[in-house]
Image (cartoon, grey):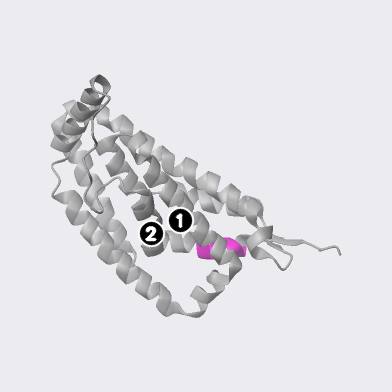
Amino acid sequence: MSITVSFTGSITALAVFMFVNSITPGPNNLMLLHGSIKRGFWPCRFHMLGICVGVTVMLWLSYWGMAALVVSFPAIMLIIKILGTLYLLWLTYQMAKTDFVAVVNDALKHEQYKQANTAVIEAKKRFGELPLSFGQALLFQWLNPKAWTMTVVAPSLAMFHAGRPWLDNYPLLAMCALINILSISCWAAGGHWLRKLVHLPRMMKVIHAVIVLMTLYCAITLWL
């Protein structure tokens, strides 16, 4: 028995949409920037994987019908916006009270000590401390309105139709996941590079203030 597969939309449009939404400033990228300045690129790997897997799962569910459900019940997005705003405000406060220069200096000293002593035991992080763990980053996507926008709109841009949306659209999911992980990696790499400015405390304080204000701006723009 043969199955006829039809396609609607544009793969190019979907790719551009995912790239623009993944690379532009938003909660995920600002958190990665902050976390990578504090700890470096490699310690952000689970945070990045959590973002990518979380967004991909949401996109997979949207192709399965979640997008239509969210569009049909606007109250769902209202609840997400409220919870997302509360989290971003809490995150802004946590960032603002951090002595950024001291944290980066401590992290650099810890890295140097680890190179000399392989038996160093990592200190346990507080809940919500940046960079996030894999699970925390994955769960945050369900409170991130920008992630919801990406995943709800995507099926309208490109979609295979063969009665199996959870299976036929795997190639599109793989493409979106690749675009997402490469885009957010740029922010983590940028934060790692900014660690070189730690010997300029005033510059680091300015960078820290900009990140805090941009995170606050993300919370405010959810309602604009």
* Front-most of residues 49 and 204: 49
The quarter of the picture where the C terminus appears is: bottom left
Quick one: which residue is furthest to the right in this view? 1
Looking at the image, which residue is at 21% across and 50% down?
A: 126
- Depicted 138 relative to depicted 102: above or below: below
Residue type at tag 2: Leu
Q: Residue pushed farthest top?
A: 116
- Residue drawn at x 23%, y 40% as measured from the top left: 207
The picture quadrant where one finds residue 112 is top left
Q: CA distance from mark 1 to mark 2?
A: 7 Å
Residue 159: image quadrant is bottom right
Q: Which residue is mark 2?
A: 139
Q: Is residue 117 left or right of residue 23?
A: left
Q: Which mark is residue 54?
A: 1
Asked if the stretch drawn in magenta spans residue 219, the answer is no
Which amino acid is tagged 1? Gly
Q: Position of residue 69 (x, y in %)?
A: 52, 76
Q: Which residues are magenta?
A: 151-156
69 versus 146 height, above or below = below
State how many labels appear: 2
Q: Secondary structure at mark 1?
A: helix
Label whose residue precedes the other's in the sequence (1 or 2): 1
Q: Are marks 1 and 2 in contact (CB under 8 Å)?
A: yes
Whether residue 125 can be seen here = yes
The image's mark for residue 188 is: none
Q: Residue at x 72, y 68 (%)?
A: 163
Percent x, y of residue 62: 55, 66
Where is residue 184? Give x, y as percent: 42, 44
